[in-house]
Image (tube, rainbow, N blue to C red):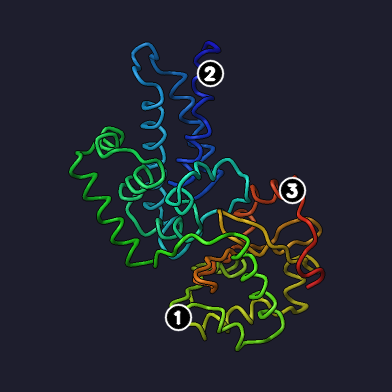
Amino acid sequence: MDSAAVDRFEASRGRLASLAYRLLGSAADAEDAVQDTFLRWQAADRARIEVPEAWLTKVATNLCLDRLRSAQARHERAAGTWLPEPLLEGDPMLGPADTFEQRESVSLAVLTLLERLSPVERAVYVLREAFAYSHAEIAEILDITESASQQHTHRARIRAATDQRRTPETDLAAARRVVEEFLAAATSGRTERLVALLTDDVTAVSDGAGLAKRLLRYTTRERVATFVRAGFKPTPAKRRLAGGSLAMHIASVNGSPAVLAVVDGRVVGVVAFQVSDGRVASLHGIAAADQLTRLNNAWQRHEPGAPVINAW
């Protein structure tokens, strides 16, 4: 393949990776899908491709759909068993991020919600909400009618509105202050203050320190506060499981403030927060090691600053 064809593909690589990540919820799978798209591009009769960007988008999207359908058929991605891979601020896969809808589409809350949609509904939602494709363009990409694209979008939005309250965008600095106060309450045993920092319809989802076969879900302020208080209470057993004494850092993960548990420079757990009107609306806890590989690689290149808790 000539260098011009390679350059043409590389110009689209970042956009394709961001699309694939939103569709698959996994950076590793997204990279594989983009590489498979490159192989298709390499083998294609490129002289017959009128709009390379549209062709690449179609191929990448449908490769992701094939992966989603295959995983569902093997019951590897059944809703309720899997959380998306968290990414540290600055990761190119988080782009584009020019609009609120684009930033919201990559939050852990929305990516978790997308697991409840069918593969086609998920693709339509991502293409429409995150990349602003028209229904005519989506119909061409997915080989469906414009009417079907509109119907899938409508159903996906209804599901999103039903499963998750849409919260207004919050200033990250203000949200960080809420998380700092929340962490102080969680680690000190001030349960009443912890409950006060939660919205009435708060939800918490966790992979059970990477050990649970199904996700752990909690609702109501009291149950979430009890779960959080137990999770953030230090014990010798937890330190042994983590590999040592932890430092707690606050960083931005998928566009939201998050607490990172770090042992000897290695991230062993992430709790991401959705903040609304000065209170915590949802929490997503991820500690499975294979879900933290890319974030850990980014953390090694990151200047984390002082931890909010030095030795937990």
Gap between marks 3 and 2 measured at Cα: 30 Å
Above or below residue 181? Residue 55 is above
Which is more foreground, mark 1 or mark 3?
1
> Could you say which is closer to the camera, residue 22 or residue 306?
306
- Identify the element where label 1 is drawn: strand
Question: In front of the other: label 1 or label 2?
Answer: 1
Look at mark 2 in the image and give the residue it sits on.
Answer: 6
Dot 3 alpha-carbon crowd within 10 angstroms: few under 14, some 14 to 19, many 20 or more: few
Q: Mark 1 — residue?
A: 200
Is 21 on the left-hand or right-hand side of 304? left
Amino acid type, mark 2 = Val
- How many C-alpha atoms fall within 10 Å of the one at disc 1: few (<14), some, or many (≥20)? some
Q: Which of 218 and 44 is in front in this view?
A: 218
Q: In this view, does 206 lie to the left or right of 259?
A: left
Q: Quadrant of residue 239?
A: bottom right
From the viewer's perspective, is residue 244 above or below residue 264?
A: below
The tag earlier along the polypeptide, 1 or 2, is 2
Q: Name the residue under label 3.
A: 302
Which x, y percent locates residue 42? 47, 19
Q: What percent of the width, then of the height, locates residue 109?
A: 47, 61
Amino acid under disc 3: His
Callout 2 secondary element: helix
Q: Give the secondary structure at mark 3.
A: loop
Quarter occupied by the C terminus:
bottom right
